Image: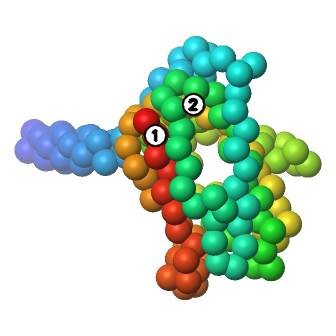
Amino acid sequence: MKVKIFAAWMAGLAIMGLSDLGNAAEDYVVNSADYVKAADWKAMEKITVTMDEFSYNPKHMVFKVGKAYQLILKNEGEKKHYFTAPEFYKAIATRKLQSNKDGEIKAPYFTAIELMVGGQLDLYFVPVKKGTYPVFCTIDDHQKQGMEGHLVIE
Ligand SMILES: [Cu+2]
């Protein structure tokens, strides 16, 4: 009996250990709300990125730490496109992702944002961690065809 309880306790420790490793790999800005609150939203900068076959325009964007941004993502192409940037989304404090027609989503961070044909989604955020982060489209061979770029936080 005692052995069984001990084994269960050990298994529990092993699971805790694994989930700790998982959290480290999923590192994102946990105190997003503080950065969002501290930023000056009246001085927010709006940047529009349009997507088509097969590019982002602009394909290189530079953001400043601590500043408030509205990144307007528009799909003006004839196919669906992704704005996949998992490392970038972990380097920013996300306020919300908004569709002017349908509502808004609040989440700690995103990994990918998909735009339907004619779609628009606005990402409100504050850059936190400096670096150069790739953005790309994960549909079929779109990235190979040129749908990729860089998001720089300085
Ligand atoms: Cu695409």
C-alpha gap between disc 1 and disc 2: 10 Å
Q: Quadrant of residue 42?
A: top right
Residue that protrudes farthest toward the top in the picture: 38
Q: Give the residue number, with chain letter if any, for mark 2.
A: 126
Task: Name the residue: 72% across, 73% down.
Answer: 52
Left or right: residue 75 versus residue 40 is right
Task: Name the residue: 63% across, 58% down.
Answer: 58
Is 70 or 80 nearer to us in this picture?
A: 70
Q: Looking at the image, how many numbered discs can be counted on the residues?
A: 2
What's the amino acid at mark 2?
A: Val
Q: Residue 153's mark?
A: 1
Q: Quadrant of the N terminus?
A: top left
Residue 95: x, y in percent? 65, 32
Residue that protrudes farthest toward the right in the picture: 101
| Mark 1 CB lies closer than 8 A to ligand 1 | no
Q: Is residue 48 above or below residue 63?
A: below
